[in-house]
Image: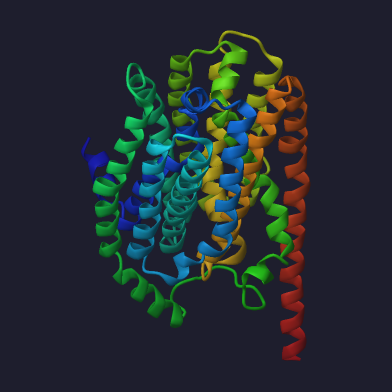
Amino acid sequence: MKPFIDRVCAIPAYGWFAFIAALASSFGQTFFIGLFGGQLQATLALSPAGLGYLYGTATLLSGILMFWLGALADRLALRRGIGISLGVLVLGCMAMASAHHALMLWGAFFLVRLGGQGLTGHLAIVAAARYAIAQRGRTVAMASYGFILAEAIFPLLVAAALVGRDWRLLWWLAAGLVAVVAWPVLRGLALKFADLDLVHDQARRQNKVDFGPAPSAELTRWTLLRQPAFYLTLPMVLGSAFVITALFLHQGSLAAIKGWGLVDVGRAFVLFAVAQACAAFIAGRVIDAFGSLGVLRFFLWPMVASVVVLGWSAGPFDVWGVFLGLGLTAGANGVVSGAVWAELFGVRQLGMIRGVYTAFMVMASAIAPMLLGAWLSAGGTLAPLAGLAIVYGVALPQVLVGAIQRNKDAARSGSTDNSGSTDS
């Protein structure tokens, strides 16, 4: 027990900040909102397609805003940034509790997605990836553990709390937890390592701290969008958000199709969380040892297996197989998507880079529920989705990672050639 306590006490303040911010962001994550999908459809007379449209368009707008707002992590003190993001999340939770028609629900979706998945989740990963130098993979995994813990405890708690209670009460409680608990704790943690900003800046100016790889020109949003490696990486790190968001938001409809009970789904979320934790733990150490590109080749495979089970199997234990595979990929993705940008582009402007990525990620998570909702409402079956998943998750990454590696080798070779010609 003592070694465990010592290890916990040794975790730096920015590691705890990443963990708790990720935990707080869960009120704006799809898995949490999807737990209320049945109640929202019944209360507001929405179809799966209608719910998916409202959620998707609100999420899409929040993702577009993250294209610009992500850079706030490079400009604002972290304590101010987290105050803004949690303030938006509190307003969103209050709006969810007060929604009585579709337009109000759309606004609530927008606020919780922007404040939760968007800004708060973004700051959790940026803090972990920016301040950790030697063990970036493990520190990013700390943020992943915050997401994982939320996915382990909230589905069961919500499933139990919804029995005989108004679902709106839970959103009022969420608003209170963010305002009264999460904000003071995160502000205090941010103040603890505020001096680290100055220490790192001074050391970096003296070339004592490694920024990571630097591009040949100043990296702006527009130069980033002209980097081939950025586009080659996106399809892999967006795949998890696309698939899991769609499945989680429509978990009620899928449970009805597959014959799963709400309690069964709540229990399966515990397996999902355990699988995530194991995958994040392993991925953090593999990335620290070998880099993130090797992990990109294979981390979507468990998710592919889940979609295959969902589409092609009709056994009584399908729910466990589906959530196990999704959890393994989600856990690895949480670490890979935090570390790969630092590995490819350095950490000087990591907030801007992750803001652009987050915009794409949120937009992918906006489109997916709309597509799946329309497919289910039209009477579509799940079987064709399995074939698409195999092509996307197994074959495509092999091609893309190979192209990224060739791009890096060519850039390194060009840099060497240029420096050689200059010296001569």
User: Which quarter of the rendered picture does the N terminus lie within?
Assistant: top left
Q: Nearer the viewer, residue 333 or 251?
A: 251
Q: Nearer the viewer, residue 312 or 177?
A: 177
Point 34% across, 53% down: residue: 17
Residue 410: quadrant of the picture: bottom right
User: Which quarter of the rendered picture does the C terminus lie within?
Assistant: bottom right
Above-or-below relation of 110 to 187: above
Q: Nearer the viewer, residue 128 or 416?
A: 128
Residue 329: quadrant of the picture: top right
Residue found at the very far left of the displayed protein:
2
* Residue 291 in view here: no
**Left or right of 327: which side holds 167?**
left
Above-or-below relation of 192 to 338: below
Give how far across and how far down residue 251 sits, in percent: 55, 24
Give how far across and how far down residue 279 sits, in percent: 51, 36
Q: How is the image coloured?
A: rainbow
Residue found at the very far top of the displayed protein:
316
**Left or right of 271: which side holds 248?**
right
* Residue 204 in view here: yes
Point 66% across, 36% down: residue: 370
Point 34% across, 64% down: residue: 80
Give how far across and how far down residue 174 sits, in percent: 33, 39
Give how far across and how far down residue 7 sits, in percent: 28, 46
Point 77% across, 31% down: residue: 388
